[in-house]
Amino acid sequence: MSANAATFENAGTVAEAGQHPKGLYVLFGTEMWERFSFYSMLALFTLYLRDPTEGFGWTASQATTLYANYLMFVYASPLIGGLIADRITGYRKAVMIGGVFFMAGHGLLSIPALWAVYLALTCLVIGNGFFKPNVSTMVGNLYPEGSHLKDRAYNIFYMGINIGACLAPIVMEIVKAYFGFHAAFAVAAFGMLISVGILWYFKNLVEHPDDLANRKHNRATEKANTAATSVDAPPSGVSDQATDETAAPRSADQSRQDLMNTVPNWKRISALIVIFLIVIVFWMVFHQNGSTLTYWADDNTAWNVSGTISNSINAFWVVTLTFPLIWFWSFLDKRGKEPSTPTKMAFGMTLTGLSFIVLWYAASLGESQPPTAQQLTAGEFRINERVVKNLGAQGIPQDILDKIVAAKDADGKNLINGVKFAAISEEDIQKKNDANTKEGKAALTDEEKARMRSGQLQLLHAINTVAPEAAPHREAFLQKAYLFRVSAFWLIFAYAVVTLGELMLSPMGLSLVSKVAPIHLRGLLMGGWFGATALGNKLTQIGIFWDIWLQSTFFLVLAGMALFMAVVLFLLLKPLKKAMPGV
């Protein structure tokens, strides 16, 4: 017997003895650093695209569209990567290949060029396809068939995902503040290097090649957990008590399956299609976090950090709320009152909608308060499609507005449209002055320094430069372009509500597919789940209306969509329960 085989066999023995194998902690570290790297990029990406200095000066619509397309491919890629690993490369090799692509992708983002962005996204999609489904599968492969520890292992593994996701935006906020976007992307690449290094160094603890053929026939719940964590959804054990160590005996599971087999296939498939539609809307709403919620955090939240850091809030709440929710479901289960899976999903969709009602209320507060003279003096400003439309309605000539929208610099970046005008710190002013001196340019004048200290003066100077005839309308520009700020409480509270909704809805989906789908269609319908997830992420492109609608209107539309689907799900609970007995 090889050393690897002995290690693996020992890992299985340890697991049976009531302890998790060491390989679990290797994969925990591998995944934590990979997710650190992945979420570092997501926390920075849309703000980077919009940044007029280090980025490309894109509008919110342009940045959101690319973000949505990227997410769609990212969430579809595990289907292909998992298939390649099953049939060609094996799991660990696939993960290593994915890691290399990830490193290349993050490294390319540190290059200040648009071609590098598109090439980087291609590498990241390929890397995710190879890495995510297969590292999740490796977790399940550490445990013997039927091990009661496997579901706990996926919960531990899921914590690794969220620890990495929580730390990444915080680190990126610090690095970006001191060294800029490109240095932050380089740090993300370094995080991926640590991830691959852990897996390479401890490879003997996580997989023995000869064992791959012996693990083709996994239990349905194991497949569901593997698939769930491959798209960062909570494993089924978070909300389904029938999969942990308190589970009913196997005979009871068999009885439930026998009951399911009495339902015609068309009813079961119809029920799953309903679930897929719910999932599309959920991900469309939920994954606004990397685009419009980041814009809201950056422009409209009263704190002394950028929107980057807001991307850590969801992961924080996942870590905080997961185990209390597990305890709550267990508490209800022991009393025979745990809701059915469709009921949980209906409550989850309701909470998702309510979280955006919270944001709608916050936006309404901000929009209803005209800025004072003091706020305008110290405030921040952005002209976008909504502002231009409102200014036109106030009688400002269209030719003036067209000049402002069309104004670009030598590199083709917008000079005014979509640009955020905010006070620049004394440290950055000094850096700019030193850079001018080093390059042989004239030092900053007192007037230029004063202008840099004020977002208001920057905006007015920019408008005066491209359209001097706009001077009589100065006050209108300031009033309409002013970025109101509301308490960070609203964003943090909304994230708490939507995270609770996520934990009630997302974990059950894949497990539900594996239990309800007819056996001969299980693979196809599991692919349907991933397809629905990818489509939902593509529809995050609804964020193109962020600069067109009022923020309150945007949040209310998303809330309405989520709540509508929740009502549909509640109305369909009875037929869904009949089509999916025992779940």
Image (tube, helix red, strand yellow):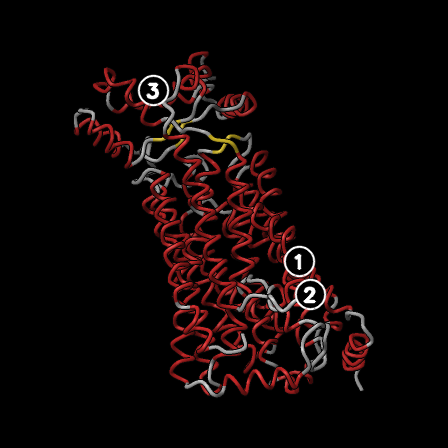
In the rendered structure, the answer to whether residue 182 lies left or right of residue 477 reads right
Name which residue lies at 51% across and 62% down: 505
> What residue is shown at x 41% (from left), y 30% (from top)?
366
How many discs mark residues in the rendered view? 3
Which residue carries the number 2 mark? Answer: 27
Which residue type does callout 1 highlight?
A: Gly
Q: Which image quadrant for residue 197?
A: bottom right
Where disc 3 sits, the SS reads helix
Tell which tag, 2 or 1, sits nearer the viewer. 1
Residue 166 appears in the rendering: yes
Q: Residue at x 57, y 42 (%)?
A: 183
Q: Is residue 249 above or below residue 38?
A: below
Which badge, 2 or 1, is on the more N-terminal residue?
2
Q: Quadrant of the N terminus?
A: bottom right
Q: Tell me the CA gap for discs 2 and 1.
A: 9 Å
The residue at which mark 3 appears reads as 461
On screen, residue 329 above or below 554: below
Give the image quarter of residue 34. Answer: bottom right
The location of residue 237, given as percent across then percent down, is 63, 67
Which numbered disc covers residue 160? Answer: 1
Q: Toward the viewer: 172 or 245?
A: 245
Q: Is residue 410 visible?
A: no
Name the element at disc 2. helix
Q: Disc 1 versus disc 3: distance between alpha carbons?
A: 48 Å
Residues tagged 2 and 1 counted as in contact (Cβ below 8 A): yes
